[in-house]
Image (cartoon, rainbow, N blue to C red):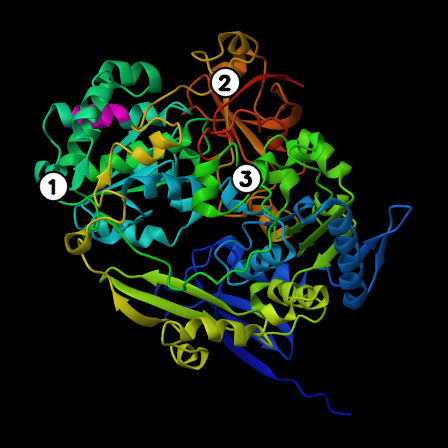
Amino acid sequence: MTTNYHLRTVNTVCGICNANCGMKLNFMNNELLGVKGNKDHPRNRGYLCPKGKAIVEMFNSPERLRHPLKKTENNQWQEISWEEAIKIIVDKLSIIKKHSGPQSVLIHVGQAGVDKQFTPYAELFANLFGTPNFSTAGSHCHLSRVIASSYTFACHPEPDFANSSCIILWGNNPASSKPTVLNMINQSRRKGGQLIVIDPRTTSLAAKADLHLRVRPGTDGALALGLINYILQKGLYHHDFVEKWTIGIERLKDLTREFTLEKAESITGVPGSNIEQAAQIYSNSTSACIADGNSLELQSNGFQTVRAISILQAITGNLDIKGGALFTQAFLSPLEMKNNALGMPAIGQNDYPLFFKYSGNAQANRYADAILSSVPYEIQAMIVMGSNPLLTWPNAGKLRQALEKLEFLIVMDHFMTETGRMADLVLPAGTFLSSYELWEDFDSEGRLIVGLAEPVIDEGECRSNWWFWKALAEEMGYAADYPWQNESEALDARLKQKGLSLEQLKKFPIGYVYGKWEERKYLKNGFATPSGKVEIFSNELEKFGHEPLPFYSPPVESRESSPEIAQKYPFILSSGARTREYMHSRFHNLHSLRKLCPEPLLEINPFIAADLGIEEGDMVRVESRRGKLLIKAQYNPDLDTEVILMPHGWDEANANLLTDNDDLDPISGFPASRAVLVRISKA
């Protein structure tokens, strides 16, 4: 008997994060054997981060979920078929809808699904079912920044690193979160561009920067207002642009006047001379861009902090110019939605109406309170896709109590997770290798690019998220609203709205150029704001009862706001910074990545550690008002003596046992996980 072996190499695009790195995969029949970067792909030019290199291990892992699992009465897992799993879900949801109403079901899509093509179909299902409680990772990642800049100049811009003469990385460390950006930063540097890094820690990029502002966690808003005040008082702003294209400049001058270099230094810990130098470099550059990171929105006043940074870009005339903040938009139009909701408010809608108005989504950071209190109504069930809330949402202790109260919990993922272990049903998700995905990009020449990543392998019982929502919709009686026979047909229908098709995109393996970025588009039609200008003073924010100008308020937990808490919990913990090895809570089970980053570590200044009798490698007890954990100490002499750092997403030391979901940003509802007061002691 002769065995036929079929060797093949296929090109695709990595779907782990949004860097869109091209990769080449080697298969023997249906077995994935190897991976390497695609040197011809414009995004990464052959580079792959550790996560990309671990694709083979991830795909072939014996720990992969391969079949739907049902929890039995004695808390054991029983393999079942997809047909049985879908039937259980349909029966449970139908009963819950009948007795408690559709609003009692929560549907959440995590980071693994945000900006992916299946997410709108999950939202469509929520709308057809009648629940207003659809949410995404946008509840605590990226969306607050998008909304804040949109209420300023109607979009969230992309930094044009390659063509910039001054780059500010503000709470953003692309060396860990998006290494492909380093090529563009290096292009700028080779042409004489200057680099400013604003970060509490000395990152690898901060060590190479022209200027590093080591800001105290939670005080970025004061730093932004200090920079704005200096630029305004010294007349370094773009007078012509400000006069023609902004409203509220005089009020801004009045607001920021108190933020002298001395005051900004006293709040932020950044020397006034460094703030002055940064303002001079930034405002005198021919073009400048700011790459703002997630850490800015994960503060108790994060929304207004991003507003201030957006205004800083505007008053210096760096909007929609080459080398500045580019105005781009998503390639695909939103999926048309039907809505069968019964008029019930979404969770968080009344508390954060601007967040809901912009996103149409519930605020997931309020789910735990709603479940435990039954306010504004009872919550009975939750479907979680590509997310591990117990490790990535704030106040994990409270959240665990809430999930225990649910009547029905479904989790769909690649591996069994901490949240999955609490579920009634756990479903095996396919990877990006078995689904259709679009990727978008723009290059240094301003060309707008869209590309297609096709399915390259059959994953058997591991089904795509799109397949799940289609199958569930059909069994629930919504087949007419999911008229597409398969995933490719659904995507093709949306591409036709843009005059393209799947077959056309297949002919462009490294991307199809569908347009070219145009500079200063506002000169034609103005800004897409109510006034048609950059709204330094926002009437919309004022109408909703918020401060119409960006303002600084100290962190809810701080010496300034809560001295009695600070006395008991004297250290500022900043948690959640990304590493190249992992994607939040994902892939900690892969051995190749564990070798590179084997465990979570608490970074602490050695002088403070010595005072507390803590040696490097000792186990440390970290406590906040919400909870406590044990974690190993690592010395970091560059840290401020009152600041400690730790990653999130680890089972072994869950940082979100310490974070809070009560004192959220008043506009976006985002948690303040980057500035939490804690106390530490040797375990």
- Mark 1 residue type: Lys
Q: Quadrant of residue 648?
A: top right
Residue 280 lies in magenta, yes or no?
A: no
Residue depicted at x 76% and y 43%: 422
Q: Is residue 235 left or right of residue 527?
A: left
**Residue 363, numbered label:** 3
Residue 398 vertical position relative to residue 110 in the rendered view, above or below: above
Label 1 or label 2, whichever lies nearer to me, is 1
What residue is shown with label 1? 244
In primary-sequence order, the first of circles 2 and 3 is 3
In this view of the protein, can residue 214 be seen by the observer? no
Residue 632: x %, y % from top left: 61, 28
In what element is the residue under mark 2?
loop
3D distance between C-alphas at marks 2 and 3:
22 Å
Image vertical order of residue 633 relative to residue 291, above or below: above
For label 3, the SS is loop
Point 53% across, 67% down: residue: 35
Indicate the position of residue 657 as horizontal and vertical percent values. Answer: 64, 29
Q: Which residues are magenta?
A: 225-231
User: Which badge, 1 or 2, is on the more N-terminal residue?
Assistant: 1
Name the quadrant containing residue 304.
top left
Q: Residue at x 41, y 20 (%)?
A: 640
Q: Main secondary structure of the magenta part?
A: helix
| Amino acid marked by disc 3 | Gln
